[in-house]
Image: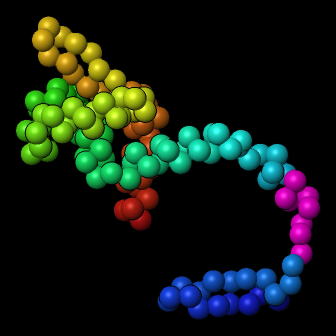
Amino acid sequence: MVQTKKISDVDVETCEQTVIHTDVVQTVSEAMSNDEDMDNVADLFKLFGDRTRIRLLRALYQSEMCVCDLAYLLDMTQSAVSHQLRVLKQAKLVKNRREGKVVYYSLSDQHVMQILVQAYDHIKE
């Protein structure tokens, strides 16, 4: 029997009795990542929790760009853009290349693009 509770306009279903399905718990437990990996995933999502970094990633999803172009596009100072790019580079979400005196930034790999596309697809549903 399933019991339904109303919690701030959301129906939450809970079991009326405690039954542990050990076969399911064992299978899921074996498939779970270790704590360090889960911490790293949580840290990755924290990086995506900042609007400025999302804007930078979204711009770099469209095209490789230099700090000057990004600052102009996002109406930010070059210093602020550089700071956020440094954070994103440390997390291996962006990479850079130098061409003369200009440094160009781009997304590190397809995984970053996939995360962005999936996130946008999800919010558009």
Residue depicted at x 18% and y 10%: 99
Whether 101 is drawn above or below 43: the answer is above
Residue 87, x across and y down, in percent: 34, 35
Asked which quadrant contains residue 104, the reply is top left
Residue 81, x across and y down, in percent: 19, 37
**In the image: residue 102, left or right of residue 63:** left
Whether 4 is drawn above or below 71: the answer is below
Asked which quadrant contains residue 74, the reply is top left
Residue 107 shows up from this direction: no
Q: Is residue 95 magenta?
A: no
Q: Is residue 25 magenta?
A: yes
Between 67 and 11, which is closer to the camera in this rendering? Answer: 67
**In the image: residue 25, left or right of residue 38:** right
Between 70 and 37, which is closer to the camera in this rendering? Answer: 37
Residue depicted at x 44% and y 49%: 46
Whether 75 is drawn above or below 101: the answer is below
Residue depicted at x 16% and y 29%: 67
**In the image: residue 97, left or right of residue 21:** left
The colour scheme used here is rainbow
Which segment did they paint magenta?
A: 19-26
Image quadrant where one finds the C terminus:
bottom left
Residue 123, x across and y down, in percent: 39, 62
Residue 31, x across and y down, in percent: 77, 46
| Count of marks, rendered view | 0
Residue depicted at x 39% and y 38%: 113
Residue 93 shows up from this direction: yes
Whether 83 is drawn above or below 53: the answer is above
Image quadrant where one finds the N terminus:
bottom right
Asked which quadrant contains residue 122, the reply is bottom left
Magenta: main secondary structure: helix
Between 16 and 42, which is closer to the camera in this rendering? Answer: 42
